[in-house]
Amino acid sequence: MPESQAQNVTLFSNDLCIKATRNSGRTNKDGDHLLAESIVLDTKLQSQRINPQVNLAELDKVRFQAVSHNKAFGALVLRNKHDVGVVVMAEADFAKLVNQR
């Protein structure tokens, strides 16, 4: 990655603060949290799996929660047994995210 791109990634990630929601009572390893005050993330631990599996019903649930709380959209964070997280979002929400920049 060129240095300018690396700087952009660093600046972008520093500006986007992730914080646990008040009522979750859990850490960001598992539970709901908010990214940049507008994106609801729901982390699902899949600690027995190397390759996480997507449950589309869970994705629909977090998307509905986001919209009902006036947030831009919701996404899942699937964390495997090696503590590697992947973000899963609907294609339409990804298009919204890309068009915001």
Image (spheres, helix red, strand yellow):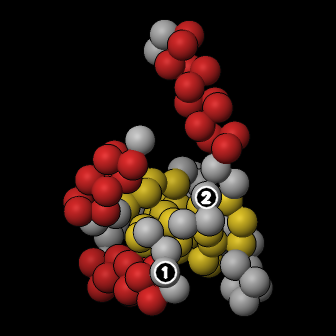
**Contact check, label 2 and label 1, Cβ < 8 Å:** no
Q: Nearer the viewer, residue 42 or 66?
A: 66
Residue 99 location (% of width, % of height): 32, 47
Q: Nearer the viewer, residue 30 or 97?
A: 97
Mark 2 — residue? 36
Residue name at image x 54 percent, y 13 percent: 4
Q: Amino acid at mark 2?
A: Ala
Residue 56, compared with residue 14, is above or below; it is below
Q: Name the quadrant containing residue 73.
A: bottom left
SS assignment at label 2? loop
Q: Name the quadrant containing residue 87.
A: bottom left
Residue name at image x 63 percent, y 30 percent: 10
- Mark 2 or 1 closer to N-term? 2
- In this rendering, would 83 be left or right of 58? right
Q: Quadrant of the C terminus?
A: top left
Rounded to the nearest angstrom, the CA distance separating label 2 from label 1 is: 13 Å
Q: Name the quadrant containing residue 30.
A: bottom right
